[in-house]
Image (cartoon, helix red, strand yellow):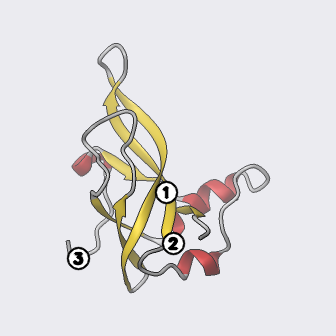
């Protein structure tokens, strides 16, 4: 997993939400860490991201499920982060803890304080 690539709905069945966009739309109710903190993550840091995942609902129809999950930063690469999912989503077993993914500072909606 050396070339940064964001997951997409079409290719992966899940994608990341743009936290900066959500904050711009609702700054009073959708807080995100300052840009400097989101750009300054280092290996070992843990960031929260918003995932959208296609998975069946109770009727079996595939719908979008939103989940906020923690990702541990493994590597920093020119404005990109490679991380490992730190927990399992509730809606599917297609994504699991330990799965590696790429993300950018715009996707970070919280940072775990040590």
- How many angstroms separate mark 3 from mark 1 (CA)? 20 Å
- Secondary structure, mark 1, is strand
Which residue is rendered at x = 41% and y = 72% of the image? Answer: 73
Residue 54 horizontal side relative to residue 37, left or right: left
Report the front residue among 42 and 52: 42
Residue where numbered disc 1 is placed:
49
> Between disc 3 and disc 1, whose residue precedes?
3
**Residues packed near mark 1 inside 10 Å, few (<14), some (14 to 19) or many (20 plus):** many
Which residue is rendered at x = 48% and y = 73% of the image? Answer: 45
- How many angstroms separate mark 2 from mark 1 (CA)? 10 Å
Where is residue 114 shown, x and y percent of the image?
59, 70
Where is residue 75 shown, x and y percent of the image?
35, 79
Quadrant in which residue 99 is drawn: bottom left
Which residue is rendered at x = 63% and y = 76% of the image? Answer: 35
**Residues packed near mark 3 inside 10 Å, few (<14), some (14 to 19) or many (20 plus):** few
Q: Is residue 2 above or below residue 106?
A: below
- Secondary structure, mark 3, is loop
- Secondary structure, mark 2, is helix
Residue where numbered disc 3 is placed:
3
- How many angstroms separate mark 3 from mark 2 (CA)? 17 Å
Report the front residue among 89 and 102: 89
Where is residue 11 shown, x and y percent of the image?
22, 50
Q: Is residue 32 above or below residue 2?
A: above
Residue where numbered disc 2 is placed:
105
């Amino acid at each position: 997993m050396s070339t940064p690539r964001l997951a997409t709905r079409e290719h992966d069945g899940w994608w990341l939400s743009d936290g900066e966009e959500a904050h711009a739309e609702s700054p009073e109710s959708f807080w995100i860490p300052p840009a400097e903190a989101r750009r300054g993550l280092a290996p070992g840091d843990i960031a929260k991201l918003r995932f959208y995942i296609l998975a069946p609902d109770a009727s079996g129809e595939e719908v979008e499920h939103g989940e906020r999950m923690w990702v541990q930063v493994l590597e920093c690469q020119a404005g990109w982060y490679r991380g490992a999912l730190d927990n399992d989503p509730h809606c599917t077993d297609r994504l699991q803890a330990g799965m590696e993914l790429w993300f950018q500072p715009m996707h970070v909606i919280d940072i775990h304080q040590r």
